[in-house]
Amino acid sequence: MALELKPSRVELTVALNGEEIVVYARRPTASEHVSYRKGTVDKKGRMRPETIYRNQVQHGLGLLTGIRKGDLTVDGQPLTEDVAGWHEQLKSLAPQIPAAVALTLFEGAAAELDDDDEEEPADPLAE
């Protein structure tokens, strides 16, 4: 049987100020992985926290495709992908969210990750 290759959308739960925010993202491409890795160092080859964080936010924003309706508001109005400039608002008001997306999808950091179209694999360590 052939393996069907297709882009998959993932659902991530990010904790922010004690609240659980659900965001939707796509998986990164191979070239995005390379770009992300290159972006973790500055021009002199040093790993600096501000360089790493800016890189995480930038690449995380590139992967984000949406926010669950009702999880975030700005001035009392829901912030979703339907709002013009939602990426910029997220970047300026809650950069932790795209940074968490990047950490999860590029570095495999612990987060609640739910593939929309895949079943959970069996735990090979379970008895």
Image: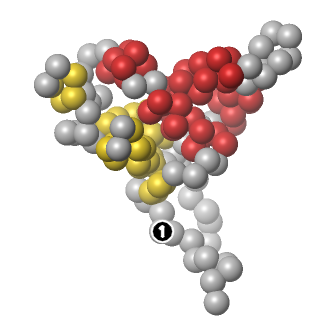
Q: Position of residue 93 (x, y in %)?
A: 36, 20
Q: Identify the residue at image location x=45%, y=39%.
A: 25
For image coordinates 68% across by 80% down, the residue present is 125
* Outermost residue toward the left in this view: 76
Quadrant into which the C terminus falls: bottom right
Q: Quadrant of the N terminus?
A: bottom right
Q: Secondary structure at mark 1?
A: loop
Q: Residue furthest top?
A: 43
Query: Do we see residue 12 in this rendering?
Result: yes
**Residue at the right extreme of this rendering:** 44
Q: Is residue 60 left or right of residue 16?
A: right
Q: Is residue 16 above or below residue 40?
A: below
For residue 117, above or below residue 14: below
Q: Position of residue 34 (x, y in %)?
A: 74, 30
Q: Quadrant of residue 76?
A: top left
What residue is drawn where x is 17% and y is 19%?
75
* Number of numbered discs on residues: 1
Name the residue at 61% across, 47% down.
109
Q: Is 12 in front, or is 5?
A: 12
The crowding category of the residue bearing disc 1, from other C-alpha atoms within 10 Å (few below 14, some 14 to 19, many at least 20), is few
What is the x, y in percent for residue 84?
Answer: 26, 16
| Type of the residue with mark 1 | Glu
Above or below, comparing residue 107 to residue 121 in the picture:
above
Q: Quadrant of residue 28?
A: top right
Residue farthest bottom in this picture = 127
What's the image's color scheme?
secondary structure
Residue 39 visible? The answer is no
- Judging by the rendered image, the residue that carries numbered circle 1 is 119
